[in-house]
Amino acid sequence: MPVARVPDVQPLIRNMKAGLDRYLQEHNRTNPLFIGIHTGGVWVAQQLLGLYQTAQPLGKLNIAFYRDDFSRIGLHPRVTPSSLPFDVADRHVILIDDVLYTGRTVRAAMNELFDYGRAASICLVVLVDRGGRELPVQADVTGTRLHLTASQHIKLSGPQPLALEITTA
């Protein structure tokens, strides 16, 4: 299999905004809430929300306690709490993450989000969809899709500048 090219992040974020604009228009969604998944999803969400030039606050989810592999990997020693400076009940939510892989992170994020209330809808926006799903989760808006082998991993570093790196285990 050929080595995947590492894309530049800024054009991907602009693609995400264009895709999100289309999604919101097609689904007649106005004034959605933006929520990033800690850590990379928050970085991407900050930049994406900045393109909308709004003073709207950004929600931040830390899903450490909601992961289904918590008993295997343990808890990071410095888990920070989630921060949702708004009520999600009956609101349209844009849930943002950096990489969509197995779907387990998104499942955990939605479980935590439901603890805050029942959103009217959730639109999943990801910087990179790398395939390899274990759960039936798909993004509504994607910056790019990469086809990586099981031994390859993609990681977002940041927050300034944001950069993607592909490594092989």
Image (spheres, rainbow, N blue to C red):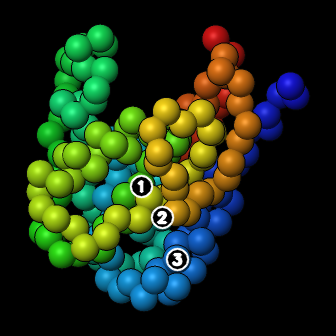
Q: Secondary structure at mark 2?
A: helix
Dots 2 and 3: beta carbons under 8 Å?
Answer: no
Number of residues whose C-alpha sits closer than 10 Å to that of mark 3, classed few (under 14), some (14–19) or many (20 or more): some
Task: Identify the residue at horizontal 42%, vertical 55% (top origin).
Answer: 96
Task: Identify the residue at horizontal 47%, vertical 45% (top origin).
Answer: 136
Residue 88 at what x, y percent from top left? 17, 67
Work out which quarter of the rendered image holds the C terminus and state it. top right
User: Can residue 92 be seen from the camera position used here?
Assistant: yes
Mark whose residue sits in front, 2 or 3: 3
Looking at the rendered structure, the kind of residue marked 1 is Ile
**Figure label count:** 3
Q: Considering only vertical position in the picture, is 48 above or below 60? A: below
Task: Identify the residue at horizontal 63%, vertical 39% (top origin).
Answer: 130
State the separation of the CA atoms marked 1 and 3: 14 Å
Dots 1 and 2: beta carbons under 8 Å?
Answer: yes
User: Can residue 160 be seen from the camera position used here?
Assistant: no
In the picture of the structure, the residue carrying the numbered disc 3 is: 23
In the picture of the structure, the residue carrying the numbered disc 1 is: 96
Is 89 on the left or on the right of 99, as rendered? left
Residue 1 at what x, y percent from top left? 86, 25
Mark whose residue sits in front, 1 or 3: 3
Looking at the rendered structure, the kind of residue marked 3 is Tyr
Q: Secondary structure at mark 1?
A: strand
In the picture of the structure, the residue carrying the numbered disc 2 is: 48
Number of residues whose C-alpha sits closer than 10 Å to that of mark 2, classed few (under 14), some (14–19) or many (20 or more): some
